[in-house]
Amino acid sequence: MPLIVTGTVGIDTVHSPHGSAEEVLGGSCTYFAAAASFFTPVRVVAVVGDDFHDDYHAVFKKFPNVDVDGLEIRQGSKTFRWGGKYLEDMNQRETLFTELGVLEEHPPKPPASYGDSRYVFLANSHPAIQRELLESFPDRVIGVADTMNLWIDIAREELLSLLAEVDGLVLNDEEAHMLTGKRNPITAGREILRLGPTFVVVKKGEHGAILVHKEGVAVLPAFPTETVVDPTGAGDTFAGGMMGYLAAAHSKDADIHMGSIQQAMAHGTVIASFNVEKFSLDRLADLTKAEVAKRYNEFAEMVSVREPVII
């Protein structure tokens, strides 16, 4: 079933204890699309400036399931740029610079050829822009959004309006606390459900993710990756793998029951575990479906509990 994503396509400069990557392809939309493409075709709606050169387009070509007809190149504008530095504890990150560039201008419009998209993911961007894209697909079967602390702080009313329209929300534990005032992520998730969504995925970094669903609660650990080079985009690849699998597994009839979301989260967890092993999209670009299947089986083995409880 057609999956579409909107968000940022940007140029990143990243420093970590394992090295540096200067002016590499990044952005929420980019990571999401690359991850989702392992399961289903995915369409990108985003905007870049005329400094988005051929080397960046060449990276997208490494993912044949990613359709970039909706990537607008705006002449006279600059692509969104972000720079960050990860500390020895790679859960800690410093933002070195943010240059909004084209993101300060009017948002892109989806091509008419994308009109049959049924699965819609609103990667991190201003909630008013997210809602505008959501409304472009009145026949959608599932709409899921991501958000961040900036929008919770400066665009809360627009975000609350968006939450009334989407089926699911993806955010991290600090963002869930900021949005609801509840420190416990499960309590925070239940507060968010009251705002409209059927499910909320609360990301906890290296500690995995919590699914708070109208049908119940589930906890999924992260895959214990031994080599972490660059965590940038881990949350976006998690969401991409989750939504890509969901669209592929339920290509005829949409299914957002709790069991389906749990399975989708497991696939997103596995894809994200590969992404952190190299800078930018380098690891996903050479990743094979056989490697994904092997690690998924390892992950399924890790989280399974077979023996009955004995008290």
Image (cartoon, helix red, strand yellow):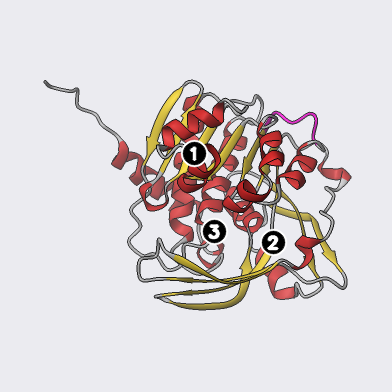
Residue displayed at 70% across by 36% down: 162
Residue displayed at 70% across by 28% down: 141
Question: Can you give x and y, in whole percent of width and height, for residue 284 in the image?
Answer: 53, 60
- The residue indicated by pointer 1 is 181
- State the separation of the CA atoms marked 2 and 3: 12 Å
- What are the residue bounds of the magenta stretch? 137-142
- State the separation of the CA atoms marked 2 and 1: 31 Å
Please report whichever mark, 3 or 1, sits nearer to the chain's N-terminal start: 1
From the image, state whether disc 2 or disc 1 is nearer to you: 1
Please report whichever mark, 2 or 3, sits nearer to the chain's N-terminal start: 2
Question: For the stretch drawn in magenta, what is the main secondary structure?
Answer: loop
Please report whichever mark, 2 or 1, sits nearer to the chain's N-terminal start: 2
- The residue indicated by pointer 3 is 233
Residue 274 - label:
none
Taking depth in this image into account, of 81 and 161 the one nearest to the observer is 161
Taking depth in this image into account, of 224 and 199 the one nearest to the observer is 199
- Asked if 254 appears above or below 78 in the picture, the reply is above
- State the separation of the CA atoms marked 3 and 1: 26 Å
Residue displayed at 40% across by 37% down: 184
* Amino acid of disc 3: Gly
- Asked if 117 appears above or below 53 in the picture, the reply is above
What crowding class fits label 2: few (fewer than 14 Cα within 10 Å), some (14-19), or many (20 or more)?
many
* Amino acid of disc 2: Val
* Amino acid of disc 1: Gly
From the image, state whether disc 3 or disc 1 is nearer to you: 1
- The residue indicated by pointer 2 is 9
| In the displayed structure image, the side of residue 173 where residue 249 appears, left or right | right
The residue most toward the left is 311
Question: Can you give x and y, in whole percent of width and height, for residue 142 in the image?
Answer: 67, 31
Residue 221: in magenta span: no
Question: Can you give x and y, in whole percent of width and height, for residue 204 in the image?
Answer: 42, 47
